[in-house]
Image (tube, grey):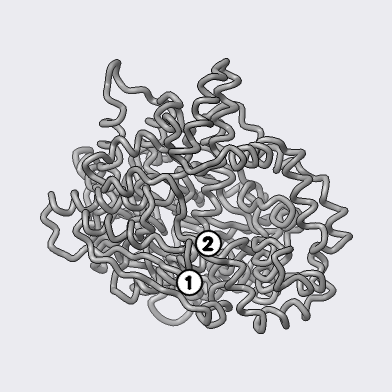
Amino acid sequence: MCGIAGIIDHHSRSGVWSDLSAMTGLVSHRGPDDQGIAVFPAKPTEDVWLGEMGVPANIYPIGLGHKRLSIIDLSSAGHQPMTDRTGRFWVVFNGEIYNYVELRNELKALGHQFVSRSDCEVLLQAYIQWGPACLERFNGMWAFCIYDRFDGSLFCARDRFGIKPFYYVVQQGRFAFASEIKQLLLLPWGEARANEERLADFFLWGLETHTDETFFSKVKTLPGSHFILLTREDQENGVYRTVRYWTPTGKPGPHGFDSKAAFGDLLADSVRLRLRSDVPVGATLSGGLDSSSIVCLAGIQRQNASIGVPFTAFNVEFAGAGYSERVFAESAARRAGATMVVLQPNQTDLADDWQSFVWHMEEPFGGLSYFSNYRINRLISQHGIRVVLSGQGGDELLLGYPRYRTFDALFKIRAAKPIDAVREVLSARRHANLPLLKQLSYGLYFAIPQFRSSRRRTLLRPYLNPGFFHRFRFQTEHLRRSMGHRTRYDLQVSELFRYQLPHLLRHDDRVSMAHSVETRLPFLDYRLLEFILAQPDEILFESGWSKAILRRAMENILPDDIRLRTDKMGYETPTGELIRRNRMMFEPLLLRHCDDAVLDTKAILSHFDSSHIDQRILCGAVSYLSWKETFKVS
């Protein structure tokens, strides 16, 4: 797990070394263990400069930079940028290829030789052997760039789900990429200008990661399951094309197979692969179904492998009724043989860490659950743990959020199964803790775009600049698209790749890497998604139970007090309460921006201590204004 950067600048009169050095140094938190820079001449016959000392004497227009968090092969053999034996291909890589052991054996059989035990070298050799098709063989998370010195091309790719970040900017004769947006803002041709279209989607409709654009107008993100191949001609013309290399499809099992057992085996194998590490592995544990399943499966795998290193699970508990799942987390930790460490935040934490938190998050956000994760990752790092397993992705894979029941009922009605729909709705009262009135409200809000857009306009109008509100209030294209699912496949794929999961992954990466912690997500194994897409709806919703296949697969593995839970919390964080308690910090911020083009900060201040203003609006407002100041956004 690392931080990467790269520049091609055919217009530069001084070369890319200085800019690349600054970009690489800015993300030391992503890789505190090692640093490497390589800069290249335009002609392949000239020497590469590796930046061991001083500044290159010549002007080099191409460069790669890397900050390393050592996880696999802790020796210097894993240093990056890494090249093959011929010196033709150079790579910088952020992520983990979990099946690198199997791939290395396959490549050895094909005649490849290795000088390290790192997964990075396996990735490079796989690209040399199979070209872009190597991506189909990887099981893991990745963002990487391979530079071909002979033909001057760049191959950039991101993992299937987009777990690891990849940002880029393009101009004629120029291309630059990085793990974090702030690195790109250091470029002389970088620009910290707000993307008003995305701000409108954020404030009006609550959307953040639904396009390849960011909150910065010139910075884009490479979507998951895509790569970019930039030829020398493409670079000179400032053109590029993203190519999708993977589209999930359902792969049904053999006739008569036990889907519960098959799913359980796949999930257990995903956990097994993600326990591969040369440093200790821990886990985050909310006490919910997903994280508890991962922790208990990890406990079994560790016991089978006779791993003697202690296994630690980390939990967050806020004071006050309704914000603690500690009893469930402790139950899962006992079953897994894990030691549990509990973080109990206090009201001064937000003020102490706000500026650093905003800097690491890089873009506005609408809730403080990310701050809870930021704090817990600091605690994880303080315990000397560099890798943690997480249950993130389980709700999107298995449709675990209550709002998904609305779509399930609609799908059943469209399939001429109204009785099944009614049965699920009625059963959900008991097995999902969802009264009929609450289910009806979900139905209205998440299935009818006109109702949701009207509701959002009513909530937001008092707190937005009138000009901004009237300009964007009827631009509902992305909102309608986020609600227009015709099938379960459409729902799951859009939630996984466009709406729900991408913003969670973005925030998870920021808050974990801020403290040099690598988060691994067993539910986001592509084999699990392809398996689930091939199964009938009943494996997800059965007699009112959500995630039915996971509950069945975890029988005798997960304690029943968790496996049969009917409520859902996660790392609940009292966002509104925390912000209001820190009014002394946020009031001057709001006053400084009374002429803001997006918000009516005076209206926000007048309702700051009132329940009239939704906590997501309050958090979005103070995060947006802090973002503007931190990154000097115009």
Q: Which residue is mark 2?
A: 178
Say which element carries label 2: strand
- Residue occupying image coordinates x 84% and y 64%: 465
Q: Can you give x and y, in whole percent of width and height, for residue 631 in the image?
A: 65, 73
**Gap in Å between the C-alphas at discs 2 and 1?**
10 Å
Q: Can you give x and y, in whole percent of width and height, for residue 632 in the image?
A: 70, 75
394 horizontally vs 465: left or right: left
| Residue 187 is at least partly visible in this image | yes
Say which element carries label 1: loop
Q: Can you give x and y, in whole percent of width and height, for residue 542 in the image?
A: 42, 30
Of the pair 579 and 429, the residue shown nearer to us: 429
609 horizontally vs 315: left or right: right
Of the pair 8 and 137, the residue shown nearer to us: 137
Rendered view: 14 above or below 247? below
The reply to whether callout 2 and callout 1 are in contact (CB within 8 Å) is yes
- Identify the image quadrant of the N terminus: bottom left
265 horizontally vs 164: left or right: left
Q: Which amino acid type corresponds to the residue marked 1 in the rendered image?
A: Val
User: Which image quarter: residue 363?
Assistant: bottom right
